[in-house]
Amino acid sequence: GAVVSQHPSRVICKSGTSVKIECRSLDFQATTMFWYRQFPKQSLMLMATSNEGSKATYEQGVEKDKFLINHASLTLSTLTVTSAHPEDSSFYICSATGANEKLFFGSGTQLSVL
Amino acid sequence: SQELEQSPQSLIVQEGKNLTINCTSSKTLYGLYWYKQKYGEGLIFLMMLQKGGEEKSHEKITAKLDEKKQQSSLHITASQPSHAGIYLCGAVSGGTSYGKLTFGQGTILTVHP
């Protein structure tokens, strides 16, 4: 079964609203979680690295005020897309790793902003 | 920064044929992951390679990492329609957080029955 759960799998929202995506590690403590974005027919691009209890590290070109990441516990990281616009429509996927250094991906979230 | 180049970008084969996808890195690979994906869905882990010259197999899929650790190949034997999808290689580069991957652009595989 899945060891990293991502929710929701699909979300449609109106332009200007905020959307929260959750990434949970189900049976291990995820000290580090990663958030990726994938546009149609393109590869996954890392957005940010999230360490439990500290601020996320964002990749160059990713607006930290636009994409709020919270990793408040060892099993949950959230990505909030604030004031979403149609250009934010994309596939967002998280991954998580812990002390055993195994890496697991969530099932992804397809965001559509109207 | 590390860059991964996958080739070919797309591949169409007849069922039963063998095929190879390559992943070339601009820097030494400290870990190389192979994933399969269908658009709008999550990643299916295939294999992870770390040692130069390492080769792993799972069912009809074999992945190798060359001795210099800058190129990996994924080989599918006797392809089936179920093999169709997007194949992604992802690399861990030295000095970065474990699990932080740089991905290739993907190879779209179509298998005709």
Image: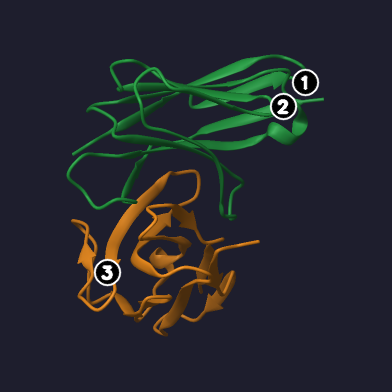
Chain colours: A orange, B green
Q: Which residue is situated farthest in the right direction here?
A: B113
Instruction: Name above or below for residue A45 compared with residue B103.
Output: below
**Circle 3 residues within 10 Å: few <14, some 14–19, many ≥20:** many
Q: Depth check: B101 or A79 in front? A: B101
Which residue is located at x 61 percent, y 62 percent? A2
Question: How far apart, in angstroms, are the residues tagged by discs 3 and 1?
Answer: 44 Å
**Residue that numbered label 3 is attached to:** A51
- Does residue A95 appear to the left or right of B69 in the view shown? right
Instruction: Name above or below for residue B34 compared with residue B71.
Output: below
Which residue is located at x 34 percent, y 21 percent? B52
Image coordinates for residue B99, horizontal then vertical, percent: 34, 51
Chain for mark 3? A
Quadrant (top left/top right/bottom left/bottom right) for the N terminus of chain B? top left
Quadrant (top left/top right/bottom left/bottom right) for the C terminus of chain B? top right
At mark 3, the secondary structure is strand
Q: Earlier in the sequence, mark 1 or mark 2?
A: 1
Which mark's residue is nearer the viewer, 2 or 3? 3
Image coordinates for residue A68, horizontal then vertical, percent: 30, 77
Amino acid residing under circle 1: Glu
Name the disc covering residue B15, or none.
1
Name the disc covering residue B111, or none.
2
Instruction: Name above or below for residue B91 compared with residue A87.
Output: above
Res B4 → quadrant: top left
At mark 1, the secondary structure is loop
Q: Which residue is situated farthest in the bottom direction here?
A: A17
Q: Are marks 1 and 2 in contact (CB under 8 Å)?
A: yes
Q: Depth check: B66 or A37 in front? A: B66
Instruction: Name above or below for residue A46 compared with residue A112.
Output: above
Which residue is located at x 49 percent, y 57 percent? A105
Which residue is located at x 61 percent, y 46 percent? B38
- Does residue B16 appear to the left or right of B69 in the view shown? right
